[in-house]
Image (cartoon, coloured by chain):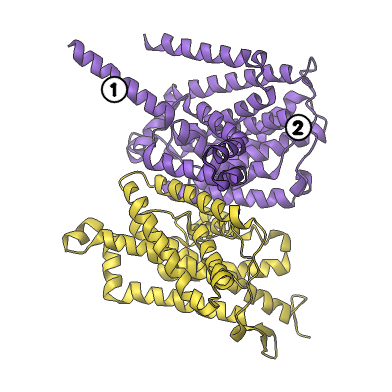
């Protein structure tokens, strides 16, 4: 068997895939955070809770209504997005004039509220969710066994992330969004309905989190606290990457996932802390983040 | 005339707390409140007087709780050295975390402190000396300075009260010193403070370390009182809880964090009973399970405070008082 650094190549490759899967979640969540922060100047702590909602909605759809994975892949993000729009319209909107930290505090409170709510119904044990039939099984690539569903997660999230990048950087709508991020007042003066744009952007950002949640449902434990530990890692990812660039967020997310995967092979004890360590190093060398701009 | 009135208020408060055990208050509960009140006051030094929102203060409370517990239990250190070791642990963690976090400002500062505290949490989870999921159990209280036996709750009660008063005085003195004035200047307008020639990074770091050390003292004292240190002290939800205490009581007020700590600790202990009561009165089954859903209640208070009640209880009272005073003076004129 082929070996690399004394570790079987197939084990290394399967950890690489696991890392890419985690990286896909980091990428989708940090992308949503970055888009929201760009326009709203709010760090959405509730992002993890909304990701969890996506996963639980997928589970509820299947368990209570018999709605399959593919339908929920569309419906759950829409529901989460709608929920986000309600949050933005009725709560967040009133805080824009205040210090940014109130946005963080509000979304932190919402996180506790949402997680506590689902916990009072489902406890903290994982809810079982099967991999959809079409994606079950694995493909033998000769040098490694590739579980189909994990491959699908990486591909789907890449498509969604790159699609988001394309819309924001290459279309008229994206141009308006970037203008709003640059200078909201001036954009409004040109007749753009900025408040509506803000609402929809928040809805879109959290829908991305919901989408990630549905993708995660068959492979990670579906349970009310699944988002809160993840979101803290994503915060570290955001600090490492800096929130200035869309492609930067995607690359940082995937890259850190892969690094984390390799750490699991070579030094498992550090696998839960390696992202934070990298954050500390980046702060020492390049405080603005890898893709961030000094203000 | 303002200072004497404040002094009277503080004296009355101290007297009330000092006689509480005589009127049947459960000493361990009041001591726990005092530990959290100290924790919240230390946190308020940053958020209220320097304008820095740390989301990682659990690291100092939890880290110091472990450090003190380890010194007292494994090394058999005298009580006062155990406490000091906890304070030192808090301060050292504060230097490291602070030096990294103040490299960014605003919302990034909060995210960095949160991430670093989470890193420490994972470290505590895996490290041998913390006892992992079980925590550090049966930490002895020992004797203070080799003279005072602390096994009695009442004796410990007055020691904790003394620790709290001394720390509070230190915070009071800091806030009202020239150093405190510079911190407030940084809170109001950091660029302006820099242009006036202040090395704001150094001031921020100093405030951060002071806050961390005091949070460490709170954590070490808590271990002494309860006899154990657990992972939940270092968990991010504890960082959130202390934010809520300060928010409910009033950021940037002297007494707010104390009141906030009392309310939140009492709520955590009693929310199950309140739920049972509401369930009986309203007949809604769901309320009976409220004790299980403390986080829902905490989250709800968070949202309400941020949306409608940002000055906190003491802040609102202060504003009402100031309003009344101006109304009076204008009526007199």
Label number found at residue B323: 1
Gap between marks 2 and 1 measured at Cα: 46 Å
Residue B187 at x, y = what percent? 39, 36
Secondary structure at numbered mark 1: helix
Residue under numbered circle 2: B227
Residue A271 at x, y = what percent? 67, 62
Tell me if B135 is positioned left or right of B174 in this view: right
Residue A80 lies in what quarter of the image?
bottom left
Colour used to depict chain B in the structure image: purple
Q: Which of A95 and B212 is in front in this view?
A: A95
Is A120 rendered above or below residue A19? above
Q: Residues within 10 Å of mark 1 (few under 14, many from 20)?
A: few
Say which residue appears at 74% left-offset and 21% top-offset: B153
Chain that is yellow in the image: A
Circles 2 and 1 on the same chain: yes
Q: Which of the image's four quarters has the N terminus of chain A?
A: bottom right
Query: Closer to the camera: disc 2 or disc 1?
Result: 1
Tell me if B266 is positioned left or right of B305 in this view: right
Is A28 rendered above or below residue B191? below
Is B207 rendered above or below residue A143? above
Q: Which of the image's four quarters has the C terminus of chain A?
A: bottom left
């Amino acid at each position: 068997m082929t070996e690399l650094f004394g570790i079987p190549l197939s084990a290394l490759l399967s950890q690489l895939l696991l890392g890419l899967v985690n990286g896909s979640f980091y990428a989708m969540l940090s992308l949503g955070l970055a888009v929201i922060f760009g326009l709203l100047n709010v760090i959405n702590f509730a992002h993890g809770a909304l990701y969890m909602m996506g996963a639980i909605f997928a589970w509820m759809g299947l368990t209570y209504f018999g709605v399959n994975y593919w339908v929920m892949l569309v419906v759950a993000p829409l529901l989460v997005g709608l929920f986000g729009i309600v949050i933005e319209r009725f709560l967040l909107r009133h805080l824009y004039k205040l210090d940014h930290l109130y946005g963080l505090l509000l979304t932190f409170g919402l996180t506790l509220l949402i997680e506590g709510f689902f916990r009072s119904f489902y406890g903290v044990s994982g809810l079982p969710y099967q991999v959809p039939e079409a994606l079950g099984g694995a493909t033998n690539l000769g040098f490694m066994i590739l579980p189909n569903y994990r491959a699908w997660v990486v591909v789907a999230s890449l498509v969604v992330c790159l699609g988001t990048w394309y819309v924001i950087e290459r279309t008229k709508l994206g141009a308006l969004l970037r203008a709003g991020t640059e200078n909201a007042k001036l954009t409004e003066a040109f007749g753009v309905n900025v408040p509506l744009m803000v609402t929809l952007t928040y809805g879109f950002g959290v829908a991305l989190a919901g989408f990630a949640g549905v993708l995660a449902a068959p492979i990670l434990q579906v349970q009310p606290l699944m988002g809160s530990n993840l979101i803290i890692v994503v915060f570290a990812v955001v600090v490492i990457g800096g929130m200035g660039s869309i492609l930067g967020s995607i690359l940082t997310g995937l890259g850190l996932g892969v690094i984390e995967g390799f750490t699991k092979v070579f030094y498992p004890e550090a696998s839960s802390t390696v992202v934070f360590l990298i954050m500390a190093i980046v702060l020492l060398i390049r405080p603005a983040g890898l893709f961030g701009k000094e203000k | 005339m303002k200072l004497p009135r404040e002094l009277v208020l503080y004296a009355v408060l101290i007297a009330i707390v000092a006689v509480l055990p005589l009127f049947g208050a459960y000493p361990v509960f009041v001591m726990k409140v005092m530990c959290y009140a100290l924790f919240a006051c230390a946190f308020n030094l940053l958020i209220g007087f320097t304008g820095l929102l740390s989301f990682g203060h659990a690291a100092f409370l939890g880290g110091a709780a472990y450090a003190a517990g380890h010194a007292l239990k494994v090394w058999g250190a005298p009580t006062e050295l155990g406490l000091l070791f906890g304070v030192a642990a808090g301060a050292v963690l504060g230097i490291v975390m602070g030096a990294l976090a103040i490299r960014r400002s605003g919302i990034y500062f909060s995210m960095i402190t949160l991430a670093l505290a989470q890193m420490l949490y994972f470290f505590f989870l895996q490290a041998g000396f913390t006892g992992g999921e079980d925590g550090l159990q049966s930490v002895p209280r020992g004797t203070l300075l080799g003279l005072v036996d602390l096994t009695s709750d009442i004796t410990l009660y007055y020691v904790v009260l003394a620790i709290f008063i001394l720390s509070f005085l230190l915070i009071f003195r800091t806030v009202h010193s020239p150093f405190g004035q510079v911190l407030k200047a940084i809170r109001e307008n950091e660029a302006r403070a820099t242009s006036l020639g202040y090395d704001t990074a150094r001031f921020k770091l100093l405030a951060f370390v002071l806050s961390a050390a005091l949070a460490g003292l709170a954590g070490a004292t808590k271990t002494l009182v309860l006899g154990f240190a657990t992972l939940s002290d270092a968990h991010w939800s504890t960082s959130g809880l202390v934010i809520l205490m300060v928010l409910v009581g009033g950021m940037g007020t002297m007494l707010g964090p104390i009141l906030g700590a009392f309310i939140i600790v009492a709520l955590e202990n009693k929310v199950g009973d309140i739920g049972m009561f509401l369930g009986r009165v309203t007949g809604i089954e769901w309320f009976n399970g409220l004790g299980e859903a403390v986080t829902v209640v905490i989250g709800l208070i968070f949202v309400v405070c941020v949306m409608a009640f940002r000055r906190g209880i003491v802040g609102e009272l202060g504003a009402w008082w100031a309003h009344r005073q101006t109304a009076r003076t204008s009526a007199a004129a």
